[in-house]
Image (tube, helix red, strand yellow):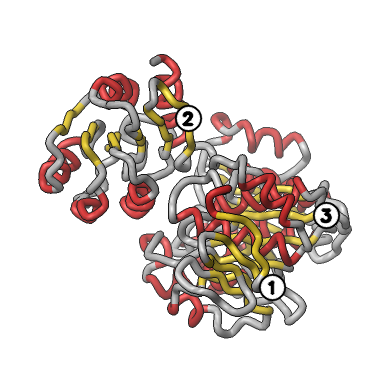
């Protein structure tokens, strides 16, 4: 870990805890900053804050009092989930106080090079896949970021010959000053998080921050099939490495005659890739492009892609039961993700869907339901999805109480060769604490068969 002095004897406010805030506060304390932590949760219900208090860090809990800014803070490190229209953040920006996220701290202290991965869809799969390929090639990768392991925590252990593979959200990328990954990847850009960013241009601008500090010695891997993405990052100084699932591209990754190529070199036959779905081809091309920049052999890439079946809860192959294949796509918390999952399969499909009602309908799914023979719905949106299924011409639509009950019903209505797919198109919070909990219940129910 680099012993930087940027924060030494500086007053820093860490706003919002969770895992990233705890890591940031502890790290800043080690860097000899004068740290104050402010979290909404009361101290008596806040074991994280209690732990920081024991470390000798000043803790203020229960609210975000705007008067805090009268204490003369020189930096704020905020939890990515706290929006910029938060009164305290708005006031800090008015005062000219830099507002950072902990990925900036991770970059400043990391001895290792960073590979940053962002985009609307595919971040986690690309991050995990690239990590596995680099591991196979003995390139000492470390995985971190929005994927669940805090970047500033991992960076403290990183060595010079390591490579940090970091998944980055738009929220995190809004809080950077110097952050400059050696390789940046943008998988794709669609509409998302507009409640946070205000409009689509601000969202895309936040994503483009991943390349704003890159130099001509760095690389930016982008989706060449999206004109708006190319335009969004047109200011970048990095070497652009394009990828495309629809055409051959100069100097990048693409598909030709049933195989994946990188810069005219054949890397792997598509039939050797076990990760299902056309949408995953984008993720695979990203990972191959980054691997090739680091000189990874085709043999190492083949070794991973011929065995990598997906990230848990993201079109994850669970098992086969009497010639029916079960897939867990509980991470599909929106319609776009479920469209991608449905398009991944050509076999007759039994779709399990439903969850939190956010006020939208599901008719956008209809063109993608041509292979759905049975629809099993549950949760707050069960009736809406039932109506969508009827409009799509699906003859058998069944409503059940929850995911656990959906699995045996789906099996009962299936035949040999069918795919049974949990892809809810909704968040889980009406019945489950997280999409992971929902997916785990699905997996358990499948094994109970």
The crowd level at tag 3 (other Cα within 10 Å; few <14, some 14-19, many 20+) is many
* Residue 127 in the image, given as x and y percentages of width and height: 62, 52
- Quarter placement of the N terminus: bottom right
The answer to whether residue 416 is seen in the rendering is yes
* Secondary element at image label 3: loop
What residue appears at the point 51 percent right and 64 percent down from the top-left corner?
257
**Is 344 left or right of 181, judged from the image as shown?**
left
* Secondary element at image label 1: strand
* Residue 368 in the image, given as x and y percentages of width and height: 26, 52
Residue lying furthest front: 257
State yes or no: discs 3 and 2 in contact (Cβ < 8 Å).
Answer: no
Task: Give the camera-side residue of 395 and 390.
Answer: 395
Instruction: Give the spatial CA distance, label 3 vs label 2.
Output: 45 Å
Residue picked out by circle 1: 219
Residue picked out by circle 2: 318
Which of disc 1 and disc 3 is earlier in sequence?
3
**Is 146 left or right of 24, judged from the image as shown?**
left
What residue appears at the point 55 percent right and 66 percent down from the top-left corner?
186
């Amino acid at each position: 870990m680099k012993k930087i002095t940027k924060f030494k004897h500086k007053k820093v406010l860490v706003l919002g805890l969770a895992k990233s805030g705890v890591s940031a506060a502890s790290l800043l304390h080690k860097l000899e900053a004068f740290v104050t932590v402010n979290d909404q949760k009361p101290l008596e219900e806040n074991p994280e804050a209690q732990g920081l208090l024991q470390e000798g860090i000043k803790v203020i809990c229960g609210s975000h009092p705007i008067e805090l800014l009268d204490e003369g803070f020189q930096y704020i490190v905020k939890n990515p989930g706290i929006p910029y229209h938060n009164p305290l953040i708005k006031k800090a920006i008015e005062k000219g106080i830099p507002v950072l996220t902990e990925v900036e701290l991770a970059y400043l202290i990391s001895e290792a090079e960073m590979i940053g991965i962002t985009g609307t869809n595919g971040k986690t799969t690309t991050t995990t896949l690239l990590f596995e390929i680099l591991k196979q090639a003995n390139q000492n990768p470390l995985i971190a970021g929005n994927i669940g392991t805090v970047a500033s925590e991992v960076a403290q252990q990183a060595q010079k010959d390591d490579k940090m593979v970091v998944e980055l959200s738009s929220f995190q990328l809004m809080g950077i000053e110097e952050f400059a990954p050696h390789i940046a990847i943008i998988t794709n850009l669609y509409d998302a998080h507009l409640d946070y960013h205000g409009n689509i241009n601000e969202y895309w601008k936040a994503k483009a921050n991943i390349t704003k500090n890159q130099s001509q010695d760095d690389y930016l891997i982008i989706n060449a099939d999206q004109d708006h993405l190319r335009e969004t990052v047109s200011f970048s100084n990095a070497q652009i490495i394009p990828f495309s699932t629809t055409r051959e591209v100069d100097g990048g990754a693409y598909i030709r005659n049933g195989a994946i190529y990188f810069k005219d070199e054949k890397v792997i036959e598509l039939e050797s890739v076990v990760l299902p779905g056309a949408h995953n081809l984008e993720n695979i091309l990203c990972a191959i492009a980054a691997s090739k920049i680091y000189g990874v052999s085709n043999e190492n890439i083949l070794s991973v892609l011929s065995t990598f079946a997906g990230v848990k809860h993201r079109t994850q192959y669970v098992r086969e039961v009497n010639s029916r294949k079960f897939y867990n796509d509980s991470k599909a918390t929106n319609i776009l993700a479920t469209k991608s999952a449905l398009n991944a399969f050509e076999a007759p499909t039994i779709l399990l869907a439903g969850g939190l009602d956010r006020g939208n309908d599901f008719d956008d799914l209809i063109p993608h339901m041509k292979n759905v023979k049975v629809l099993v719905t549950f949760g707050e949106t069960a009736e809406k999805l039932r109506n969508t299924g009827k409009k799509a011409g699906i003859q058998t639509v069944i409503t059940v109480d929850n995911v656990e009950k959906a699995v045996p019903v789906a099996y009962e209505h299936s035949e040999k060769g069918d795919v049974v797919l949990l892809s809810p198109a909704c968040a889980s919070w009406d019945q489950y604490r997280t999409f992971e909990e929902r997916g785990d219940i699905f997996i358990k129910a499948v094994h109970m068969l």
